[in-house]
Amino acid sequence: MSRIKVLGIGSPYGDDQAGWKAAELLAQRAAIQSYAPDMLCIEIYDRPGMRLLDYWQGENIVYIIDAVVSGGAIGAIHRFQNMEIEEAQCIVSSHEMGVAQALQIGRALNQLPENIIFYGVEILQAAHGRDISSSVARAVCHLVARVEAEITRTLAGLI
């Protein structure tokens, strides 16, 4: 049986917390809590960069949730899968080394999961404040509902 791993990535500052907040909220959902750890694992990482290769090693299905800066509307939710992530030139991580770059290196090293789904929440910039903005917080709630539904459908198909 395949396990799903969710990686909430970002930093503890401002809207860059979007990936963390989404992972935290997702882990609190009753439907998500009903799955055993060998079926679903949710983890949070601070600006992982190349360490993503280690975090997704051996996994079949990986969801990555992060804040992105592409010039889109604040709070917009982006979804890309597998090669679309690398091809989405408009998506720029709010970190020095983004998911797309880690994917390129993982592909070159033959160290990619079968299926990677990237969800990004559009932010204005990676701020240094403590609080997440209300528009990004609302978007995170919508994103969590989408990811929960998608994971539930996927796991139902795996059982």
Image (cartoon, grey):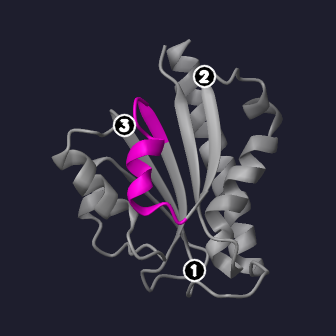
Q: Residues within 10 Å of mark 1 (few under 14, many from 20)?
A: many
119 and 50: which is toward the camera? 50
Say if mark 1 contacts mark 3, CB within 8 Å: no
Dot label at residue 123: 1
- Secondary structure of residue under mark 2: loop
Circle 3 sits in a helix, a strand or a loop, which is it? strand
- Seen in the picture, residue 96 relative to 38 is either above or below; the reply is below
Q: Which residue is drawn at 31% across and 47% down?
A: 82
Give left or right: position of 48 versus 8. left
Q: What stretch is highlighted in magenta?
A: 47-62
Q: Please state which amino acid type lies under the numbered disc 1.
A: Ile
Compared across the picture, whether 149 is left or right of 34 comes to: left
Dot 2 or dot 3: first in sequence order is 2
Which residue appears at 58% of the width and 19% of the height? 156
Between 95 and 28, the residue placed more toward the observer is: 95
Measured in 3D between alpha carbons, the distance from the residue under mark 1 to the one under mark 2, in whole angstroms, is: 31 Å
- In this view, the residue in front, 33 or 109, is 109
Coordinates of residue 117 in the picture (x, y in percent): 43, 47
Tell me the quarter of the picture where residue 150 sits: top right
Q: Name the element at disc 1.
A: loop
Q: Which amino acid does label 2 sit on?
A: Met
Q: Residue 15 falls in which quadrant of the image?
A: bottom right
- Residue where numbered disc 3 is placed: 115
- Position in image of residue 157 (x %, y %): 51, 18
Q: The C terminus is located in which quarter?
A: top right
Residue at 32%, 61% (x, y): give it: 100
C-alpha span from label 1 to label 3? 25 Å
Residue 35 x %, y %: 71, 23
- Tell me the kind of residue under disc 3: Asn
Mark 1 or 3, nearer chain start:
3
Q: Which mark is residue 39?
A: 2
Query: Residue 47: where, in percent of width, then height?
Result: 53, 66
